[in-house]
Amino acid sequence: MGIRNQLAFFSILLLAASVEAPAQTIAVQGGNQIIKLTGGTPIVDPMVSSNTTCTLQWKRPKNTAKITVSTICPGQKFTLKVYAINAQDGDAAPEVTLTTGMLAVDFVTNLNGNRTKTYTCTLRYTASATYAQGNSSELGGDDVHTVRYTILEQ
Amino acid sequence: MAVQVPQVTTLRLMTLTLALNVSAINAQPGTDEITVTDQTSQLVWGINGSGKKITASTSIAAPIFTLKVRALNPTKGTPAPEMILSTTPNDFLMNVGRSTGSCILSYTGIALASRGVGADSHVVTFTVVNQ
């Protein structure tokens, strides 16, 4: 093998080595939660209740990143929204209305923190239902959401 | 994450205690029957179940005087005809399933001058039931 070919081969090896596997991790802590809408007095329509038990943890990838959110909820009947509270890195997007089958939308943007550190935010879920919408028993059961959080380069 | 909505039925009376005073001022010359009406009370409800109605009853089995009630100007539902309150629940307001609303409680006390004086103390109960 001539010198020129050897140099070309070495350059290619360097280029391949510079591509890193991104260290992207994201996880929800807090388990499956149930928001129960029970009304009360004074009578307020719609009924609204929030849950802030769960947190989201992440490590950002190499470049500026963001977190998106979407949901799947077959036969969704009631309204569910989510918002990032006290995000330790980045900017919380406006509260997101979770609609089954939606395209992923921004949840936390401009993640620029230390790549070796794990950051968190609190997940504030807010559910609502009008009296006119009915109740779980008559409508075939509760709304069960599989909410998906994805971290990706912005 | 799950959203659970149980069946919710809430009734609220905006005036808990009411006094109907039938006096001579309400009497009409030559008429034995004296009536007085009160429309200062309000009933408010929130019901997320289907096919519901509201009934009304009283605690007194044999009152001295007659007490009637009807739903006036309901924002939802269909008012039943004015009824004489008895210990048996009777239809008061129909078709209030999956709704929030309010109505005025129109009470009419009827006394016969020939019956003399006295007092009835009613505990009126409104109940949401299946229609």
Image: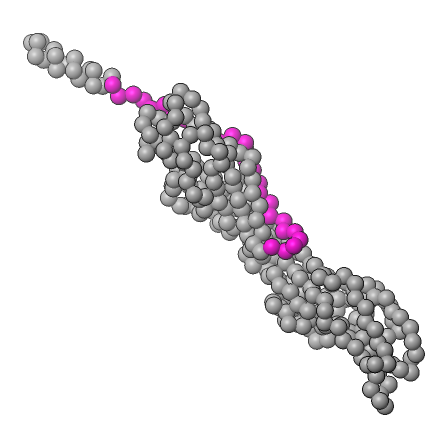
Task: Quarter of the image for the C terminus of chain A: give it.
Answer: top left
Please tell me which residue lies in front, A6 or A62: A62
Image coords of residue A144 (percent x, y): 52, 43
Residue at x 71% of width, y 61% of height: B14
Highlighted range, magenta: A18-44
Determine the residue located farthest toward the bottom in the rendered image: B30
Task: Tell whether position B129 is magenta.
Answer: no
Residue at x 60% of width, y 67% of height: B76
Q: Is residue A28 above or below residue B89?
A: above
Q: Is residue A133 above or below residue A35?
A: below
Image coords of residue A52 (percent x, y): 55, 37
Tell me if residue A150 can be seen.
no
Residue at x 52% of width, y 41% of height: A125
- Please identify the quarter of the rendering in which residue A9 is found: top left
Image coords of residue A62 (percent x, y): 32, 25
Report the side of A69 relative to B89 (left or right). left
Number of numbered markers: 0
Tell me if residue B107 can be seen.
yes
- Please identify the quarter of the rendering in which residue A116 is found: top left
Residue at x 65% of width, y 51% of height: A40
Q: Main secondary structure of the magenta part?
A: loop
Determine the residue located farthest toward the front in the rendered image: B25
Image coords of residue A70 (percent x, y): 42, 41
Report the side of A37 relative to B80 (left or right). left
- Please identify the quarter of the rendering in which residue B126 is found: bottom right
Q: Is residue A81 above or below residue A109?
A: below
Task: Tell whether position A23 is magenta.
Answer: yes
